[in-house]
Amino acid sequence: DGFRIHRGRYNRGLYQFYGIDNYVFFEVNKPIPITHLQQKRGKKWHDWMLDDPPHWRAMEIYAKHSKGRVLTTGLGLGLYLQALKSNKDIESVTVVELNRSVIELIDPLIPILPSLTIFHQDFYDFLNEYHESYDTVLIDLWVTHGSKEKMEIFYHKVLPLGGALRLRYPKASITFHGFYSAS
């Protein structure tokens, strides 16, 4: 359960933009700072979340379309919360984060939001215990490496959870970061 914040940079070159705003790549002309939330597995640190341009832009888009009572999973670097602070249509924000060390690391970076609640809990357990209603649901649970792993997670985790969430929150806008929007 070891996590850290690591400061790095993107040097000159092309980087993936993952189709956000219909762009496949973005170009870096001079180095830009990047923050990595990393998890230690064995002796190596692995990226869990980045604050690079495509992640910032995705969270800005999600936040712009969010409204009312918001439920999100995976605190990450708190980019979604940062983007939500300029949205006046937000009534409350509930974050469900499994890793206590992520919450502790990111806590100083969390902006003041209306009625913000952070649960240190597994998201599936949260769904079984709490039966609040939400208008916006953003699911950001999985870190994937490669298309094969992404497809396995999509078919075995995302689609079943999407169906369950649609039944639970029939009027909500539901988005799976990196996968699809079910709204």
Image (spheres, rainbow, N blue to C red):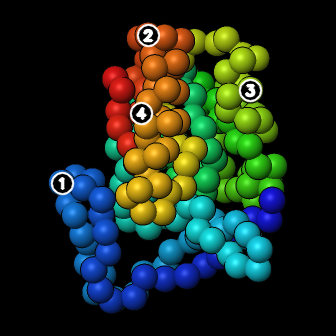
Viewer-closest of 95 and 165: 165
Q: Position of residue 38 (x, y in %)?
A: 66, 68
- Residue 36 has which mark? none
Disc 2 vs disc 4: Cβ atoms closer than 8 Å? no
Q: Secondary structure at mark 1?
A: helix
Q: Position of residue 49 (x, y in %)?
A: 56, 61
- For marks 3 and 1, the one nearer the N-term is 1
Viewer-closest of 131 and 124: 124
The structure residue drawn at horizontal position 20% and vertical position 60%, both measured from the top left corner, is 23
Q: Amino acid at mark 1?
A: Asn
Residue depth check, mark 4 versus mark 3: number of the one nearer the observer = 3
| Measured Cα–Cα span from mark 2 to mark 1 | 29 Å
Q: Secondary structure at mark 2?
A: loop
- For marks 2 and 1, the one nearer the N-term is 1
Q: Which residue is mark 1?
A: 22
- For marks 3 and 2, the one nearer the N-term is 3
Relative vertical location of residue 50 with respect to residue 77 in this rendering, above or below: below
Viewer-closest of 48 and 79: 48
Q: Which residue is mark 4?
A: 175
- Local packing at callout 4 (Cα closer than 10 Å; few below 14, some 14-19, many 20+) is some
Q: Amino acid at mark 3?
A: Asp
Q: Secondary structure at mark 4?
A: strand
| Measured Cα–Cα span from mark 4 to mark 3 | 19 Å
| Measured Cα–Cα span from mark 2 to mark 4 | 13 Å
Q: Which residue is mark 2?
A: 170
> On the rendered image, what quadrant is the C terminus found in?
top left
Disc 4 vs disc 3: Cβ atoms closer than 8 Å? no
| Measured Cα–Cα span from mark 4 to mark 1 | 18 Å
Q: Which residue is mark 3?
A: 125
Relative vertical location of residue 83 with respect to residue 108 in this rendering, above or below: above
56 horizontally vs 20: left or right: right
